[in-house]
Structure formats: structure tokens, C-alpha cells
Image (cartoon, coloured by chain):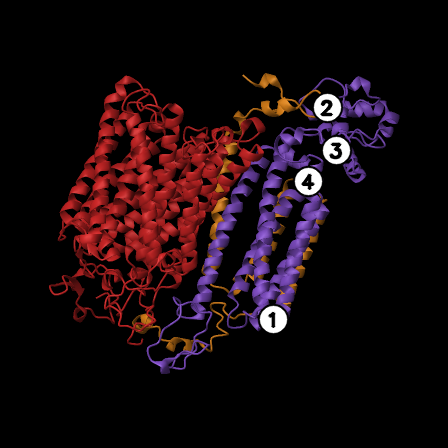
Amino acid sequence: MTTLDATSPNPSNTPVPPVDNYLTYTRGFLSWALTLDHKRIGLMYLVAVLGSFLVGGIFALLVRTELLTPGATIPGVDAEVYNQFFTLHGAIMVFLVIIPSIPAALGNFVLPIMLGAKDVAFPRLNLGSFYLWIIGAVLAVVSLAYGGFDTGWTFYTPYSTTTTTGGVIPVVTGVFILGFSSIFTGLNFVVTIHKLRPPGMTWFRMPLLLWALYATALIQVLATPVLGITLLMLIVERVFQIGLFDPAMGGDPVLFQHFFWFYSHPAVYIMILPAMGIISEIISVHAHRHIFGYRFIAFSSVAIAIFSFLVWGHHMFTSGQSPLMNVVFSLITFSVAIPSAIKVFNWMATLYRGSISINTPMLYGLGFIFLFTIGGLTGLHLGTLNTDIHLHDTYFVVAHFHYVMMGSALIAMIGGLHHWWPKMVGRMYNEKWGIIGFSLVFIGFNVTFFTQFMLGSHGMPRRYYNYQPEFQIYHVISTIGSYIMAAGFFWTLFYLLQSLFSGVKAPSNPWGGRSLEWQCTSPPPHDNFKTTPSVGDCYDFSVVKWDEEEGGYVVDRSEVDEERPDH
Amino acid sequence: MFEALREFNTMSHDTTAAHATHEDHDDHGLGHIVSYGTLFGIGFALLLMTIVTVAVRYVDAGELNMPIALGIAGVKATLVALYFMHLRWDRPFNALVLVGSIAFVVLLMIFVLMDTAQYAPQVFEGNAPKVQEVLTVEAPGAPIADQSQLP
Amino acid sequence: MTSIQANPSDHADDQGHDDHGHGHDPNLAHHFESMEQQMDSGKLGMWLFLATEVLFFGGLFVAYAVLRARNPEVFSYASQYLDTIMGGINTCVLILSSLTMALAVRFAQQGRKGLLVLCLWLTMGGAVGFLVIKYFEYSHKIHDHLVWGGTFYEPVDESQKLLLETPEEALDTPLVTGPREANAAEARDIAMSQIVNRPEEAASSVKTAALGPAGLSAGPAAAEAAIEETESDGHSGAGHLADPEMPVGTHLFFGIYFCMTGLHGIHVVIGMGVIGWLIWRSQRGDFGPKYNTPVDLGGLYWHIVDLIWIFLFPLFYLIH
């Protein structure tokens, strides 16, 4: 285009600084509040999600602290208040943090650039999604003013339809709205990947993170509306007492569970699939090795998305569900482990004989593989009918889902945050401090939650305020672990924020990646690319060379045959 | 083949000239106009089927009642989707999206109905206590629970 | 966002032509390469949204299926209270409005603004007509307490309450006598024996819903006739509560009826908003052969509303 940047808001025509990026492109509150730039929207989501993580984490610490002793521990916290603590912790973490975190915060930023597009398909809808998230979060907070809610994040009937705690309707409305935020994000991603791929970017040249986000988006679009209608029915039941879920009126409480888990099981795959996508990127880039089994990983993402809709009943084995359906769901649950296992084997094979850089993103990636293996395997204990009878509603379940939701999805998200941090903010964080942060988090996590497997198999029920004295030692160890983990997270927050002010300026490609986002400046310009990126095999690292002058890697285009990019 | 990728961020408008004569591209449905005949024909067929389905309601075919009514509804829905909603001339993926969503509803329905049918024998008959409460002797026509069914 | 050009000779004119002389449709968003890509993306996006609507209503369809599977007699009995003809008319109204919507899309593609606006107004008229008929249906039911939950079991007004409360010995014509039976058929036989025994009182009584006017045809037909008679009279008589035929759990039918048709009605209102917006934009002249995507997508939404009603109608109004 013209020599002077035609998009510069510079009415006096003074020369613009040479480095113009999406952060400095326009200034002022409204330029952020009304932005249509996917990168800015992603950043706003990131701040919002991390803020919610802090709030949800504080509730978790309150729960763990209360459990230090049987009976009352914190003054003023009785069983009713305790119920509110774990409910809020669960609801905030599930709906405000983990479900949106990777797709909306990291995905929004990275997807169009990785794809080679200028933006997502519907930028205004994207901004709308963000504001829907905000409204949902506000309603969740407002519910506290109405007395909070203590139903557990699962809102099981008939308690949720009859409890006098006044915050149920506001928070359920808030979650309903959050559902639409999720739906619109997913819708946007599906259309972007289908329609905005530039020529040359075929399906099988896309980075695996995009396959993962695509599969996630499919689940978001198909599953979330069922949550919507479930919550709507819950509100209607509460207000009008229709009798759908109330056995005294001829209804069926197990029906609520069917509806709820038809969404909430695929929801956990909304959490884990993008995390797996991030791991594919991190492992291959930081081991400088072509991903092993690209097509297997790509197809397994879609397979997991489809399978995830067939297993929801494994949350209901002891609820009164018929034995026939118990067997059906248990059987299918076993098979859903297969695509996940395929991915783990492929990542291991990628690491083998790779040139592994032990840096923070790689550590998070390795941590993921370890923790996800434990989390996934313990899912099999729960998917087996006869063991689940004993383990259902115990701490074993709590430990299992924290291993997969937190130990895997959240760990991957933080690893991805470190991996793309230089790209997003243009600064490098302090690598040594990153390793310290990871160590605290990893050690703290395992101390907290491995203990809970033992708690659960010994019979400690979940969501209990009081417990038998023989469990206390486990609870104390678990709580100490949670404090270590919290320290790790606070430390991570500290050094990431500190890097914004005094971090080393980041080159375009600090890690040696080959996908398109590493071929624009850090941070990217407003319209994503100043010079045409080189499309090719995004896992072929042999053409990526360290450039001393730049202080980072560059793609050596003389080695890339751009007419036949896969060679 | 990388031309478009090379040019895309320079906002060149060369491509629009090539697209200027695109109105009759039928493979994507852009610009395809449905004829009057088709629209009115389908509309008339839908009205006709509505009348038929109402008339059939007064004929008792026993077990087939619901399949017939839903079958006619299905045909009507298919016509609306194919012709009014343009799926006949649109990209097949759009039709796949619609069919996929219906498939997932059917999946939920089948599994839930199977479950309900399996535990139905264990459900108590008669009025539930809360309903029974509001049914007083002053409403004699309403049926009453047989208390002996409770353990 | 406006471009600030350094060189005045590069000045862009109103149609967005730059100095190379190529057209740039003002309706083309900056992140799309062509109008075709934009239209394609819009359509796919809309279909994905319609898929979410299908799944949204689908949940209620599943709830309906479960309730009907567990209480088939409730659905057979309670559907008599729904007016099949009104429902049929509503269905035709929606189908016609779908037709006018499809015509509107056609006229937008042809750039015929006047006919486009007319058809959009006709579609809007269909929506209003649908809601008017719905209003009459609903108000009837609410008046007769044929509604959800506990209200179903409350007498409508004082006279009905009095009637239901009155010990049967005090009535000239008892409603139902004999021992209370869980078996509705036995209750009906008892009622019939009452009618046979006292035909004159049965004929003269206008207050008992269970007894037919001539006392000859008892059972469901009589109940239905009596109910329709009372509905046309305007007063409710003893209503559904005095009907010995009424199976356990009938309130569930009306609960799910109001849920599903109510949610559908909300979508009709939203559709009216969408059509209104399209009318405003069409009047302004926004649409033509080069750009008519909003009309197309608005049409898709309206057709889904029609589609859902096509399934609701037989499920509620055409039960035997």
C-alpha cells in the first residue's frame, strides 16, 4: 500500500514511529472497549479470565483452609457457608475460567494469525462474545448479594429448584448468558477455519492447535445450547413449579441430570482439547522436532469431539440410571480413552531424539503429559461400574477431575501463555524465574491432589464440611500443597507482570517456531502481517535458523521450496 | 497458487474485478434465485399437507397415529429446509450442519427414553403427595393415589 | 475506519474506488476478500446458529418425549382441551408467512425494493396474526386454570369452588358418587350409572362437566361436549377438576405445552424484531443484487421458527 501507513491515526502527518503494533495502533479506553481487533479482544479475555482465576482460587484456598480440621476451622464458617465456598469455586472455575480460557483468550489471539487470516469471520460477534462473558460474570457476582448459592456447580434438582438460597436464579441466568458467549466464540472459529483459510493453507497444513480449536468449536456449538435449555428449565421450574424435575409433581430428577451432563461432559472436552492442541505446538517447537503422526493427532481431535457426546451417563452411574444405560455408557467411556492415548504416544514419539530445550513452556508441556496420564488413567477407575460404586462422590473424583482440568488443561494454558507471551506483549519473561514458578506449581499440585486420591479411596466423601479424624492427616497435607501451588501462581503472576516493564524485547521468533504467527513482529502489527509469510509445513524446523543480528530465529526462505512447501 | 496469500495483506482489489461477473455461480448458491413456480408450489404443498394432517387426526389408525402425523411433519420440514431455506442449491456443509444438529437431538432422545423405559417399572403409580395435598374432597373427580403402593 | 492518504491524488471517492480504479463494495468488510466469501461465511454462521436453536428446542422435545412415554393417557386426555382448528390455522399462517419471507428474499436479490418491503410487511403481518391467535388460546386456558403446576388444581372462581366443595348430598345431582377408585374406568361406570338412574336431573344440570346434556352419551365424548359447551357459555362450571376421566399428572401436559409454545412465541417476537429491522433497512435502499445477505439470513431465522412450529403442531394438537 502507500508508504505512509494508511491506517495510522495521525492527523498532523508527523512521521510515525517505525514499530507500530496492535497495542499502540490506537489509544484510549474506547479504542479497547469497542475494538474489533481479535488480538485486543483476546488480551481483554486473558485479563478477565486470569482475574476470575484469582477469585476462584481464593475460594479454593478458603475450602482447603476450612478442611484443615474436622468441623469448624475458620471462625464464622459453618457448613452452609462452606457449601457456598465450594459451589462458587466450582462455578467460577468451570464457567468463567477453564471453558473460555484457551479458546477465547489464547485462541482469539493466535488463531487468525496462525491461519493466515486478517481477523476472525465475525469480529463484531467476537466483541459481543466478550461482553456476554462480562455480563455473565457480573450476574454471578450479583448472585452473592442475593444470598449466594450452595447447590454445587452442578445445580442438581430437586435441591436447586427448592432451596431458599436466593442467588440461584441470578447465577443460573449468568451461566445461561456465558453459554451464549461460548457458543458465539465457537461459531466464529468454525466459520473462520472453513472460510477464511487463504489459498495454500489447506486443512492438512494447519497447525494442530487449529484442528484442536476447530474440534472444540464444534462441541461448543452443539453442546452448549442443551445447557441453555437445561438452565432455562431450571429457572422455570423454580419460578413456576411446573413439575418437570420434581417427583412430587410427577417429574423426574434424573432427567435434569441427563440434560445437564449431555452438555457438561462435552464441556470437559471443550476444556481439554485446546489444551492438547497447545501441547502439540509446545512439544514440537521446543523439541525442535516434527510432530509425530500429524494426521493421527488431527483426526483424534475430531474423534474425541464426537465421542464426547456419547458418554455423559458415566456421571450418573449411581443416580438411579438404569443398569442397561450404565453398561452402555461404561463401554463407550472406555473407548473414548483411545484417541487421547494416541495423542500421548505421538507426543512421546515427538520428544524422542528431539533437541529438547528445557525452558518454561517445555516444562509445562512435560508436566502436562505426566499429569494428564494420571488424570486419564484414573478416569478408567471411575468409568468401571463396580469401582465407581465405591468411588463416586468421594475425593477420588475430585482428584481425578483436578488432574485433568487443572493439572492438564490449566497447565497447558499457562504453558501456552509462556509460549506466546513474547508474541503477545513483545517482551521475554525471566526464564529462571519461570522454572521456579513451574516447580512450585507442579510440586504443589501433586502434593494437593495425589493425596486426594488416597483420601477418596479410603472413603472420604466430597463436598463434606466435617469428616472423621482419621482423614485429617491427608487433608492437612493437601492443604499445604495448595498453599505451595498458590505461591507458585502468585510468583508466576509477579514475573509475568514484571516482564512487561523490564523484560528483554522479544524477537519475532524467539523459540524457532515455523507456524505463521512466528513470522510477524512481536507484538504483531494491527493487520497481522507486514510482509507476506512463508507458508509451508509448519512443523518442518530444518529451515528455521538462528539469526544473531535479530536475536531470534528466522525462516531461511532459500531452503523453502514455496511451490512445493511440504518438501 | 500462493498469489492470493502474497497479496492478501496489501489490500489489493485485483480480485474484485475477477469476481464482477460472478452472479450466476450456482455451486455456492450466491445469486441463485428461486423461481415463482417453486416458491408458490411448495407453499401450496405445505398448506395442503397441513389440511391433510388435520383431517387425518380424526381418523384413528391406532399405533400408526404418531408416525403418520410426524411423518407428514417431517416431509413439510424437509420441503421448507430444501426450498425455502435454499439448501437444495447451497453448499452441502450447511445441510450437514442442520442434519447433524437433529442427529444429536435424536441421540439424546434415544438414550434418555431407553433409560426411562428401563426404570419405569420401579416408579410408583398414582398421585404424588404434593398433588394429592391440593386435591381435597371438594374435588371429587380427580383421581387419587392408592396409598397401599407406597412401602 | 477511514484511510488517511498521504498523497492527495490517491484520494478515494465515495464508492471506495482507489486510484487503481477497482471497485470496492462499501458493504464488504475489510477482513474478507470478496463479497462471495463474506456471503458464504455469513450463511455458514447463520446455519451454525440455527443448529444451536435446533438443539435448544431439542431439549424440550426430549422432555416432551419422556413425559409422554411415561404418561401416555395424560396426553391423550389433555389434548382435547386444545383447539385443533385454531392450531391448524396458526400453522397455515406461519407457512404463508414463510412463503412471503422467501418471496422477500427473491425480491431483494432482484433489487425490487417496493415488493421486498411489501413482502416483509406481509411476513410481519403473519407473525402478528400468529401471536393474536396464540393470545386467544392462552387467555382461554389461563381463565380455566388449564395451566401448569399447582394452579391446575385450584378452582377457577368462587362458584366453581363452591360447587366442588358442596357435599354431594346437598346437590340435586351429585357429581360422582360411590367409593373412590384409582381406576378411572370404574369411576366412569359409576358416573354412568348415576346418569342412567337420573336422566332428568342430568339433563337439567348445567354445572356438571362430567355429565352429558342428554344423559345418553357419557364418558369422554360427554365430557368433551360439556367442556366445549361451558367454554362457549363463558362460565366454567365444574371444570376439569370434576372430570372423573382426568388421569393423574395432567398438569404436566399443560406445563410442557406452555413451556414449548411459550418459548416458540418468544422466538416469534424476536423474529418480528428482525423483520422490523429488515424493513427499515430495505426502505433505506440498503439491499440489492450485490448485497442482500441480511434479508437472506433473516429469512433463514424465520424459516426455522416455522419449522419448529411444524413439529409442535402435531405433537400437541393432533394427538388422538
Q: Separation of disc 3 and disc 4 at Cα?
A: 12 Å
Q: Are marks 1 and 3 on the same chain?
A: yes
Q: Amino acid at mark 4?
A: His
Image coords of residue A436 (percent x, y): 16, 42
Q: Amino acid at mark 2?
A: Ala
Q: Which residue is mark 3?
A: C220
Q: Residue furthest left?
A: A548
Q: Separation of disc 1 and disc 3 at Cα?
A: 55 Å
Q: What is chain B's hue in the picture?
A: orange
Q: Which residue is mark 4?
A: C320
Chain identifier matching the purple colour in the rendered picture: C
Q: Separation of disc 2 and disc 4 at Cα?
A: 22 Å
A468 relative to A182, above or below: above
Residue at (40% x, 59% y) in the render: A123
Residues under numbered marks 1 and 3 in contact, where contact means CB atoms less than 8 Å apart: no
- When asked about the image quadrant of residue A424, the answer is bottom left
Asked if residue A269 shows in the view, the reply is no
Please, what secondary structure does the residue beneath circle 1 have? helix
Q: Amino acid at mark 1?
A: Lys
Image coords of residue C156 (percent x, y): 72, 31
User: Which quadrant is home to the C terminus of chain A?
Assistant: bottom left
